[in-house]
Amino acid sequence: MTPATQMGSVLTAFGDRIETVLDSLLPASGSAERLYQAMRYALFGGGKYLRPYIVDASADIFEVPQVASLRTGAAVEMIHAYSLVHDDLPAMDDDDLRRGRATCHRAFDEATAILAGDALLTLAFQTLAAPETHSDASVRADLVASLADSAGGRGMVGGQMIDLESEHVQVGAAAIRDIMRLKTGALLTFSAMAGAILGQADARARESLRNFGSDLGLAFQMKDDLLDVEGDEESLGKRVAKDAEAGKATLVSLLGVEGARREARRMSDAALAHLDCFGTRADRLRAVADFVLARDH
Ligand code: GRG
């Protein structure tokens, strides 16, 4: 079995566990039923659940109870799902296909997709703030502040803004890396750090996991850009060659396919080096770094 297939099965099994938690947080019926249908459509659409898996693997290092790691992972997945729904809208990427099926605004309508994204964003913070996530209020406040920092204007949303502004503009490798660290890396960084927050670990452990997540984010986005060039619509479940079409410079267009592959490997190795201090307790995170490069979707 290749590392990618092995991790694929691990993620499938984990997917059942995280979906149970997400399902309990999003009742299918009740008021605003259409809104909840769209939220559930965005969450349960065949995603890899990589971010909640990283939260769980990071929490495992500190022997955090699984109810805490799964609820925190569910909150990150809500933010991730909202970002994809909004990114697919006509005002942004204007995509019809995501995860091999209609994007949320195509399956429902634009207004519903915007509101579903808004409600997922809000529910993420509500989930973290609930006492069921952690008995210590200062830990919950830390989770809320850190996720807000990663997902907001100084993180993912800010990265998306800079990315949009960079279309049809000459940008260099350093600027592209900065965008990747924000747009893609910020949420992966929070996911990696979340275990240390939940486990009330010391500042050094937290910093190591922050650096792991940040470098992993770069490797992940480089692989995503490579798949945009080399992958096919069927296995990716989304449109390909989007960057070239949007006139967007990426490390693939700047360094070529081989250069970008080397760079992705370099960042994955850099990510792995930050795990040395955790010994075998970080093996699940190591497997994630291998998977990020080996994946085909
Ligand atoms: C629009 C608020 C807003 C933010 C936009 C995350 C993002 C920022 C845009 C989504 C599009 C994009 C290319 C994001 C980069 C991160 C990325 C490659 C996401 C896809 O993540 P996977 O592969 O998706 O983990 P699945 O489908 O497995 O959940």
Image (cartoon, helix red, strand yellow):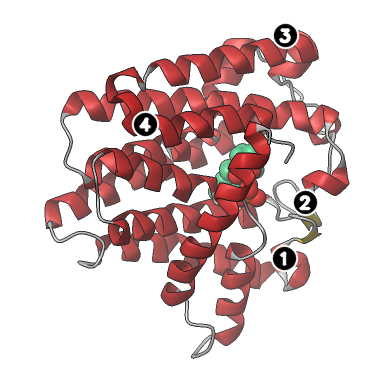
Contact (Cβ within 8 Å) of mark 1 with mark 3: no
Q: Residue at label 3?
A: 259
Sequence-wise first label, 1 or 4? 1
Sequence-wise first label, 2 or 3? 2
Q: Residue at label 4?
A: 282
Q: Residues within 10 Å of mark 4 (few under 14, many from 20)?
A: some
Residue at the spot x=51%, y=32% of the render?
287
Q: Residue at label 2?
A: 94
Give percent across and percent down for residue 247. Answer: 81, 27
User: Disc 1 marks which amino acid?
Assistant: His
Q: Nearer the viewer, residue 241 or 72?
A: 72
Label 1: element kind: helix
Nearer the camera: disc 2 or disc 4 = 4
Asked whether residue 94 is in view, the answer is yes
Q: Point out the image quarter for the C terminus.
A: top right
Label 3: element kind: helix
Q: How far apart are marks 2 and 4 (CA)?
A: 39 Å
Q: For disc 1, does the CB lie below 8 Å from ligand 1?
A: no
Q: Which of 50 and 164 is in front in this view?
A: 50
In this rendering, is residue 258 above or below 96?
above
